[in-house]
Image (tube, rainbow, N blue to C red):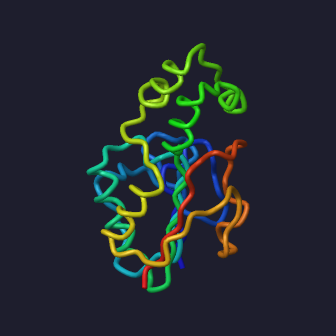
Amino acid sequence: MKKLHLGCGTNYIKGWINIDLDSKLADKKLDLTKGLPYSEGSVSHIYSEHFIEHVSYTDFKKLLFDCYRVLIKGGVVRFSTPNLKWIVDCYITNNLEGCKEHAWCPETACRMINDNFSKWGHKYIYDREELTICFLEAGFSDIKLCEWKQSEHAEFFNIESRFYHHDLIMEGTKR
């Protein structure tokens, strides 16, 4: 059964189909805003780390519906993305120390929040509530907030490649 790694960038995961439009490491070069070229019910797991924030909200929703389509019954999707709540909390408390572990040190809280929305090409930053709504609208159930590198599914255990722990990580299951 196929396992898809969407927007792989420089993180190649052995045993997965690593997909990216621009990465030299990708097994398949695809524009993920154009849909997934897999048949219905042909994929068991889908993972993406720091990709969904780089596409528009509308394109992400279309992709998520397509993820649901290609997953088998009981298949699971896992997305790791910057966490809007953490970003806003840092802004409100003027806590720039947390940014240092991300290897980026903005001089002010204002620059920190603007960097999150523009410096790395981000188009939409999610919080738990918004990502949950997206999962539900696409048909997913058993939606879970997950800890960094933790999962009830062996395929996702210890999968994150980024060294920091403030991401929003959620899983949803096709029932």
43 in relation to 130, above or below: below
Exactly how many numbered labels are in the figure?
Answer: 0
30 or 63: which is nearer to us?
A: 63
Would residue 10 appear left or right of 67 to someone viewing this image? right
Pick whichever, 134 or 85, lies toward us: 85
Is 11 in front, or is 64? 64
What is the x, y in percent for residue 162? 67, 44
Q: Tell me residue 93's x, y (percent).
A: 59, 30
Where does residue 77 sit, x and y in percent of width and height? Answer: 50, 68
Determine the residue positioned at 43% across, 50% down.
29
6 displayed left or right of 103:
left
Residue extending farthest front: 93
Q: Quadrant of residue 124?
A: top left
Residue at figure coordinates x 45%, y 24% from the top left:
114
Image location of residue 56, percent across then percent down: 31, 44
In the rendered image, the vertical position of residue 143 relative to residue 36, given as above or below: below
Q: Residue at x 43, y 48 (%)?
A: 126
Image quadrant where one finds the C terminus: bottom left
Q: Is residue 133 above or below residue 20?
A: below
Q: Residue at x 65, y 20 (%)?
A: 105
Outermost residue, top direction?
Answer: 107
Figure quadrant of the N terminus: bottom right
